[in-house]
Amino acid sequence: MKLMPAKKALYPGSFDPFTLGHLDVLARAVELFDCVEIAIASNSRKKSILNAKERESLVKTATANLPNVKVSIVEGLVIDYARANDYRLLLRGIRAANDFEQELEMSQINRSLSLKGYKDSIETVFLMTSPEYSFIRASRVWELLELGGDVSTLVPDCVSKYLEGRNIGYFQQTR
């Protein structure tokens, strides 16, 4: 099967919170694709600290200077959203080798689901996070906040300012 070059990619994730690692992957992706849509997962089974609207607002602010970026909240299966919106490629960032196993499994499940009733599959493209951001994990951002640490070197400025204004006890109660 011959694949047509993809002009757009869907970048799904929880982005709770949006980090400099996410921004790094996105900034490089907009150089590869005409359009990248960030699909913020709204999954009731996964406990997020920031609600979907907060995450959407922060991601929009953090990416305002990047061309051709769209931000949406997605409920349900990402693969269904991708199919309904004509996406052929999912974009995923990988920080380190231990991310690869989980991402590989997810990409294979998505590929399998995307073939159900369709001739063409939806493929996953992996971009490695730049080394200077490879240690940033959203869960570590929350841990630092809980302990009163400074997260300004881990997240975009708008996210850092927003999180500084929040009650840290709130985060401890929601975990």
Image (cartoon, helix red, strand yellow):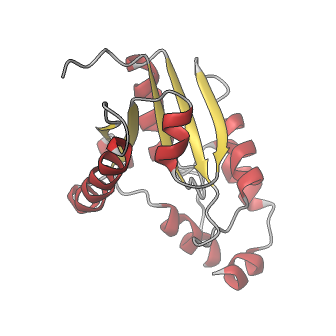
Which residue occupies the foreground of this view, 152 or 77?
Answer: 77
| As drawn, 11 above or below 154 | above
Which residue occupies the foreground of this view, 41 or 15?
Answer: 41
Q: Which quadrant holds residue 109?
A: bottom left
4 left or right of 10 in image: left
99 left or right of 54 in image: left
Q: In which quarter of the image is the N terminus?
A: top left
Image coords of residue 172 (percent x, y):
68, 82
Which residue occupies the foreground of this view, 42 or 51?
Answer: 42
Rendered residue at 64%/57% (across/down): 42
| As drawn, 175 above or below 110 | below
Q: Can residue 20 be seen in this view?
A: no
89 left or right of 47 in image: left
Image coords of residue 68 (percent x, y):
58, 18
Which residue sits furthest front?
117
Q: Is residue 151 visible?
A: yes
Rendered residue at 41%/27% (across/down): 29
Which residue sits furthest bottom?
173
Rendered residue at 65%/35% (across/down): 71
Image coords of residue 130 (percent x, y):
33, 40
Rendered residue at 44%/36% (across/down): 24
Q: In which quarter of the image is the C terminus?
A: bottom right
Which residue occupies the foreground of this view, 79 or 10?
Answer: 79
In the rendered picture of this protein, how many numbered marks are placed on residues? 0
Q: Which quadrant holds residue 90?
A: top left
